[in-house]
Image: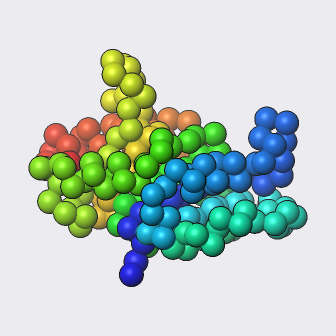
């Protein structure tokens, strides 16, 4: 059975630092601990080739075995979050694609909340339709409609665009552009 959700984690933090004493591993462990069904989720970590050798200096977290799949992929393109995220999306197999960041943590039961959001939406026909799930920063936050850092999208939407983050960007404003594309496609009836 294919994974239902693909977590896409680009990182440059392959070695511990003062700000990130566990590097990428802290985010990994929280996503795993707070998932109800890790056996239905694949986790794809992407690292630029300039840091790839360093990732194996320390053992991988034990929890990597609990995912439906865990993969470390080497990015040979630009050393940026856009190329690393898009590589992870390209390698993914899940029906729902979600981005992970080293300093971004989900609520408890995040996978169940995602599935419930899909199932309870009258507008989403099924997992093969085009949809986006937005994670809001909070009620009344003005920029929730401008940024799409938190959230997920269907494989069908990813396949239509051919990327998760527009390759015309490296990092900054790629989330703004993603939100603009989503609102434009929503107005045209292409995405829910």
| Residue under the point 19% across and 63% down | 126
Give percent across and percent down for residue 149.
Answer: 47, 39
Residue 31 in view in this figure: yes
- Tell me: 47 left or right of 113: right
| Residue under the point 78% across and 48% down | 22
In the image, farthest residue toward the bottom? 1
The total of numbered circles placed on residues is 0
Q: Is residue 7 above or below residue 21?
A: below
The image's colour scheme reads rainbow
In the image, farthest residue toward the right? 57
| Residue under the point 64% across and 53% down | 29
Q: In this view of the protein, which residue sits in the foreground, 32 or 54?
A: 32
| Residue under the point 71% across and 66% down | 62
Give percent across and percent down for residue 8.
Answer: 53, 58
- Tell me: 67 left or right of 120: right
Give percent across and percent down for residue 54.
Answer: 84, 62
Q: Quadrant of residue 102?
A: top right
Q: In this view of the protein, which residue sits in the foreground, 169 or 33?
A: 33
Q: In this view of the protein, which residue sits in the foreground, 34 or 106?
A: 34
Q: Quadrant of the N terminus?
A: bottom left
Residue 91 in view in this figure: no
């Amino acid at each position: 059975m294919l994974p239902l959700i693909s977590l896409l984690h680009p990182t440059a933090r392959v070695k511990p630092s003062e700000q990130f004493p566990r590097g990428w591993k802290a985010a990994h462990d929280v996503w795993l601990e707070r998932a109800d069904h890790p056996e239905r989720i694949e986790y794809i970590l992407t690292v630029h080739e300039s840091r790839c050798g360093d990732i194996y200096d320390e053992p991988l977290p034990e929890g990597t075995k609990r995912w439906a799949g865990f993969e470390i992929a080497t990015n040979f393109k630009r050393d940026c979050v856009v190329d690393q995220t898009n590589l992870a999306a390209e390698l993914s197999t899940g029906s729902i694609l979600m981005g992970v960041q080293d300093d971004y943590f989900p609520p408890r039961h995040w996978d169940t909340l995602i599935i419930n959001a899909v199932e309870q939406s009258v507008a989403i026909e099924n997992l093969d339709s085009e949809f986006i799930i937005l994670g809001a920063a909070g009620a009344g936050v003005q920029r929730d409609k401008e940024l799409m850092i938190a959230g997920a999208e269907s494989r069908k939407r990813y396949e239509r665009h051919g990327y998760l983050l527009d390759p015309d960007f490296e990092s900054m404003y790629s989330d703004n552009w993603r939100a603009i594309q989503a609102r434009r496609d929503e107005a045209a009836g292409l995405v829910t």
